[in-house]
Amino acid sequence: MSDRLHSSRTVRALFIVLGVIALGLGIAGVVLPVLPTTPFVLLAAACFARGSLRFHDWLLAHPLFGPIIVEWNEYGSIPWRTKIVAIVLMSTTLTVSIVFFVEPRWLQLALALFGVALATWLYRVPSRDRHEE
């Protein structure tokens, strides 16, 4: 794994900063369903893999985020339950935002299109624990 670290100390520091930002957004996504947790945590893992073995190992060992990262790294998939919960929470939050808080029609449409695009991408990611019919 150490051969994955970037050779430049400055670039490693930038990867660590980007990883911390991505992880912060992922953690915010746990309580704010409009932010997708999984893609930000995967991005943080990728940044830490190039910037800091210590942070990367810590994230892989984390009880909440580690299994998702391992599943993605080893199989390129996201657990079915994680995927469905993310889509349902994101859709609910976007719907409430569009109906009650967002005024301009163009912004409502933009949020709806963003939600559909993100939900479609997430749904299309394979899940090993659910066989397609």
Image (cartoon, rainbow, N blue to C red):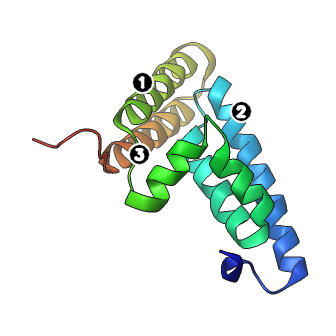
Q: Quadrant of the C terminus?
A: top left
Which of the labelled discs sits on residue 126, or is there none? none
Under tag 3, what secondary structure?
loop
Q: In the rendered structure, which amino acid carries the disc numbered 3?
A: Ile
Which picture quadrant has residue 51? bottom right
Label 2 crowd bin: few (<14), some (14–19), many (20+), radius 10 Å? some
Could you tell me residue 96's position as x and y percent?
Answer: 53, 16
Could you tell me residue 103's position as x and y percent?
Answer: 60, 22
Label 3 crowd bin: few (<14), some (14–19), many (20+), radius 10 Å? many
Could you tell me residue 57's position as x and y percent?
Answer: 70, 56
Q: In the rendered structure, which amino acid carries the disc numbered 2?
A: Ala
Label 1 crowd bin: few (<14), some (14–19), many (20+), radius 10 Å? few
Vertical side of 108 occupied by 51: above or below: below
Query: Could you give the CA–CA distance between mark 2 and mark 1, rounded to whole angstroms?
Result: 17 Å
Q: Is residue 129 rendered to the left or right of residue 101?
A: left
Which of the labelled discs sits on residue 28, or is there none? 2
Disc 3 target residue: 78
Query: Could you give the CA–CA distance between mark 1 and mark 3, rounded to whole angstroms?
Result: 15 Å
